[in-house]
Image (cartoon, rainbow, N blue to C red):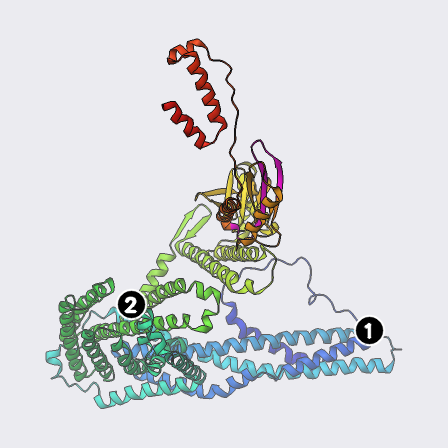
Amino acid sequence: MTRRTSSLLGPAVVILVAASSSALQQPVEPEPAQTEPTSQQEAPVAISISEIPRRAEESTVRLDEIERTVPADPGVEVIAAELPGWTRLLDEEQAEVERRDLSAMSLRDLNEAQNRWLSLSAQVDGWLGELEVRSTAMGSALEEIRGLEEVWSTTQQAATGDLPGPVRDTIANVLARADNVERAVLERLSVVLSIQSALGEHGVVVRAHLGRLDGALREARDSLLRADAEPLWSAGTIDDGRYDSSRALTGHFGGTWRSLRDYSRANTDRFAAHALTFLVLLWLFTALARRKEHWQQREELQSSSRALSHPFANALFLTLLLSRLFYPRAPLGLYELNRFLLLAPLLIILPRLVYSSMRGPLYGLAALYFGDLVVDLLPSEAFVTRLAQLTLSTIVLVALLRFSSTGRTAPGHPQGRWWRAAILAARAGTVILGVSIAANLLGRARLSSLLTEGALASAYTAVLLFAGYLVLQGLLTLLLETRALRSFESLRIKSDVIRGVATKLLRLVALGSWVWFTLMTFQLLSPFIDAAANVLGFTLSVGALEISLGDVVALLATIYLSIVVSRMARVILEEDVLPRFALPRGVPSTISKLARYTIVFIGLVVALVAAGIELNRLALLAGALGVGIGFGLQNIVNNFVSGIILLFERPIQSGDTIELDTVFGKVSRIGIRSSTVRTFEGAEVIVPNAHLIDGRLINWTYSDRLRRLEVRVGVAYGSRPQAVLDTLLQVAKKHDEILQEPVPYAIFDGFGESSLDFTLRAWTANFDDFLRIRSELAVGVHDALMRAGFEIPFPQRDLHVKSVPETVTSVMGLSSTDSANTANDNAESLQSGPEQAATIERRRSR
């Protein structure tokens, strides 16, 4: 390395470290001490002569790559091009803030100024972050170049005098190339550092003015209950020349227009994305409206069809309603313009969806909110502004009183909880407007303006969110009925569940958005966030253990979300993804369960990290758990491991019919610890997984759902066996649910005590109904044998009575001859059929 290059590199590295010092302001945990020197700390080693050509080529290629990446940075060029215009904008905003009296500005003007300076702060922070990344990369490149120069310088110094000339030239060329690339990097780095230094100075100015505005806002909020103007009855006679109304109005419009102009120039991509969203929504609503007649034929879809009956208005309404997502730190004038534009589609959509008696209050609210927007355009210090504010507050108060008094008994309205909440909100609004009127009369102009604007904006926002909820609910309902989405099995089967969950989620989002906006309108959002942070930051210390409420909430929320995501993943895998692949039996269920357990496990780890629990501190818990497993948790761990074996080995699956000891039924669930078997009697038996692995298990449906049926029958002696076999086979072949492959067959079992015994065996694929099929087959066998003239005998026994004791005959009142006849009759009845027995009985009676 040459002396001149070294002299340039030193100051550049110093400037780089100084410019990156802002990144070192956050507390960083100390790195562990290094016991061995790194490669940068080791002395450079000379390259052997045999490796010089190869290493020279590698070094040259690397230097060329560094040189190509130095100027290839369009981000820095964009920053350099936009910096002069941004600087002029900063000077204008600074002059505007310094010109105005912050203590006399309204809360709206202070919020507007704060938004503009927050946008400036976000811009300068983004640029500084981008430049810091670039300067850090160039600093790393400089260190790499310096390392190459040290290695090749050491090689050049260590070379002997008899080194060939081409080799010496190669070393010199590499060093010269490194010197040229180093100078190019230093020049580019100096440009980046100069821009970074200028932005750093601007950042100091931005932070200083943001601090002034924050202080002015806090002072304005704290002084809301103090008088900031003359009482209204005397304000009209005061003209102390404090301001010029026309000049104030012109300045107000000029500031708003300047903010909108500058924001639109700096965020053209956001406006383009917003316009694209409108076009997509317009196409979607138009496509759904084409099937309007089809939707209206179904009663459950009529309300959704009415909500989407005006495609252009629906698309425009949703696009404007989502504006804050596209413009997070826009000027307040843009938000007010957006709410004004929302009036048109709102008045087209909502009257179709509410009761006719509610259309009047709806139009009245729109007119009042428009009047509030007009009042906002007036200078806050002018007497006419306070007078207009008083008039507007009085009209709103009268409207709320009328609504709260007659709304409860309005005909045709459902008296649900949302309607009662609206009545309660109206009564709260009357109190707020009463306080606003009193504050305006007594000279609390800021408080009066805040309360009136807050009440109207909160009511208008509630109506907007209600309309957005209806439109989104109708959109979701009709989308779930389209052919494209119903092609997904999971969406078709779970459409009712998805609709119910989405409806609840939309309600929650709408309610949360309304609460958030209401708090922001009444200047209560920052105190609310601070109070919530204090509550969530409450820490309970037990020895070395510290638990905060925020950590607990983060832990529970993360676990809940992981469970919800795991269930969604299971449904999608089981219904849509896995059935599309030809997988072996049981593999889809195994994949689904493993995916679910994996997601829950990852969620648990993330939850522990989110709760601030260091995983390395769980070693003690793991040790204690191991001791517990060794003593009291053996069965639980055994069942857990058995559950994992069931998942991978797959001896049983959900839906299989199994027989285990005295349990005979269908497997309804396979869990990680136990499985559930539903018996055919209706009982649900919880079987530990270890019993399914260790015990003798019979799975009737392991490889298929075929079931063999047997019908045993006996015919009287004297029947032809082959004719009986043919009759039995004909019965099996005629049954619709008997398979012809495997082929049904009948066998002659042998000679029984009272009959010739036969067995009919056949197969059915309807395992779940095999009892019914076997019963039908047995009835068919009986009827076929009866039609063929075969007799189905019953067991017979011959009884021979040799003598009867006289004591028995005397007790029965029979003579010896009668007793002998009776015995013979009994023997004859035992040998005969039912008809002969009846004849003998009649003979006895005679």
Location of the N terminus by quadrant is bottom right
Could you tell me the amino acid type at mark 1? Glu
Q: Which mark is residue 524?
A: 2
726 or 135: nearer the eye? Answer: 726
Could you tell me the amino acid type at mark 2? Leu
Find residue 129 and report its horizontal and vertical position in percent: 51, 75
Q: Which quarter of the picture shows residue 517?
A: bottom left
Outermost residue, top direction?
807
406 sits left or right of 50 in the view: left
Find residue 308 and report its horizontal and vertical position in percent: 33, 77
437 or 768: nearer the eye? Answer: 768
Magenta part of the protein: which range?
Answer: 747-767
Find residue 410 and report its horizontal and vertical position in percent: 15, 69
Q: Which mark is residue 51?
A: 1
Q: Residues within 10 Å of mark 2 (few under 14, many from 20)?
A: some
SS for tag 2?
A: loop
User: Can residue 570 be spotted in the picture?
Assistant: yes
Find residue 663 and report its horizontal and vertical position in percent: 51, 40
* Residue ID at (46%, 73%): 484
